[in-house]
Image: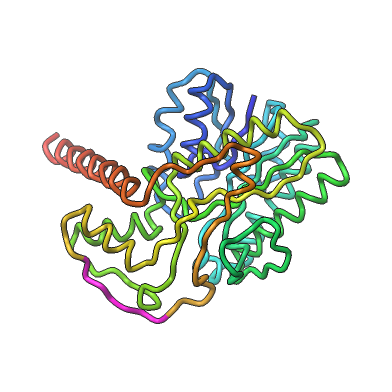
């Protein structure tokens, strides 16, 4: 059985569904952090909850008592639970340390007690700071620019300690700006789409010059699954691997792509650069290609179209619910 933490989130719910499609027995945990609407996360889980091979527990990895009372012994863990986002971490650094560092430590200790030694850890491209691109796993001098990024780097280092002391096999996956259906409502593509559709202005920081390596959720999930297969096929491993799209896109170009897909012009509200923001992210995926046969296939334009189709379906469903509630 595989345990997925953060199972009700954007990436977690997609990973759970793919594992179930492949025939695995999966347990999921999530604390439904109030960062965004709990109903959205329940909806993310709606397909998985129909499967007999999926079991779910609501709880928080910062709660040792919750972990100790879980009634299973997983063969591997895909650890996706975390407080996410650069800007929110500037306002709540302690909360990010508690959830992302202490929570990961609690999970590592729980694994040690339960005899589980296989871990995939969700890290982030943000750990690289403003290093020269493309970002390589061989980069040693990396200086995170935000509390969020620092917690992810701390998690990687703590994972190495448990690999060294207790022979844990661990793969740290550094995700690069994941997007697609179920993306969190606070993230740029989702937020901008909603605002453009409803004729509301969007905040454009730094004149739209920042660049991100937008990576479609389907490519990320395939990378996670291939990492799992690599993890269980090898012993005495500790790896850090980028999962990106190798194609950074400026914020200005992203907005133009959204405008073309939606068929409406955005109302731009230009703002100063935000503290903690990176200027550009771009992944070297040579290592992922070599070890995981990872080949991102979805372009930004194609991924935006898929996301927008999902967004419109969600809007239609919400309107139908409102209509039924009005006339009941």
Q: Residue placed at 64% from the left, 30% from the top?
A: 229
Q: Quadrant of residue 110?
A: top right
Q: Position of residue 8 (x, y in %)?
A: 48, 40
On the rendered structure, is 39 left or right of 229? left
- Magenta range is 266-272
Q: Residue placed at 54% from the left, 30% from the top?
A: 56
Instruction: Please say if 273 is above or below 148.
Output: below
Q: Position of residue 248 (x, y in %)?
A: 45, 60
**Viewer-nearest residue: 31 or 18:** 18
Q: Position of residue 136 (x, y in %)?
A: 64, 58
Q: Quadrant of residue 107?
A: top right
Q: Residue placed at 27% from the left, 47% from the top?
A: 308
Main secondary-structure element of the magenta-colored stretch: strand
**Residue placed farthest to the bottom in the image?**
272
On the rendered structure, is 106 left or right of 196? right
- Image quadrant in which the N terminus is located: top right
On the rendered structure, is 81 left or right of 258? right
Q: Position of residue 39 (x, y in %)?
A: 38, 42
**Residue 270 is covered by the magenta coloring:** yes
């Amino acid at each position: 059985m595989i345990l997925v933490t953060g199972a009700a989130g954007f990436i977690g719910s997609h990973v759970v569904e793919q594992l179930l499609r492949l025939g695995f027995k999966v347990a999921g945990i999530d604390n439904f952090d109030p960062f965004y609407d709990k109903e959205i996360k329940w909806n993310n889980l709606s397909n998985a909850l129909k499967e007999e091979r999926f079991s779910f527990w609501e709880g928080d990895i910062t709660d040792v008592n919750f972990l100790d009372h879980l009634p299973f012994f997983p063969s591997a863990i895909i650890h996706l639970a975390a407080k996410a986002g650069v800007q929110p971490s500037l306002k709540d650094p302690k909360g990010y340390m508690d959830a992302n560092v202490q929570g990961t430590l609690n999970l590592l200790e729980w694994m040690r007690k339960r005899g589980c030694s296989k871990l995939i850890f969700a890290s982030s491209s943000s750990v690289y700071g403003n290093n020269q691109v493309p970002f390589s796993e061989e980069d040693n001098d990396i200086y995170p620019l935000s509390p969020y990024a620092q917690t992810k780097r701390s998690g990687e280092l703590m994972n190495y300690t448990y690999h060294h002391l207790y022979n844990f096999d661990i793969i740290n996956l550094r995700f690069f700006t994941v997007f697609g259906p179920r993306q969190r409502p606070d993230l740029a593509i989702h937020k901008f789409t909603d605002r453009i559709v409803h004729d509301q202005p969007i905040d454009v920081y730094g004149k739209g010059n920042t660049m991100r390596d937008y990576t479609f959720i389907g490519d990320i999930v395939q990378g996670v699954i291939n990492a799992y297969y690599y993890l269980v096929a090898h012993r005495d491993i500790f790896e850090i691997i980028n999962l990106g799209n190798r194609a950074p896109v400026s914020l200005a170009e992203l907005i133009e792509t959204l405008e073309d897909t939606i068929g409406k012009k955005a109302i731009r509200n230009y703002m100063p650069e935000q503290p903690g923001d990176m200027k550009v992210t771009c992944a070297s995926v040579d290592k992922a290609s070599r070890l995981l046969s990872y080949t991102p296939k979805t372009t930004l334009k194609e991924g935006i179209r898929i996301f927008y189709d999902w967004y419109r379906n969600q809007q239609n469903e919400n309107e139908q619910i409102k209509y039924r509630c009005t006339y009941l």
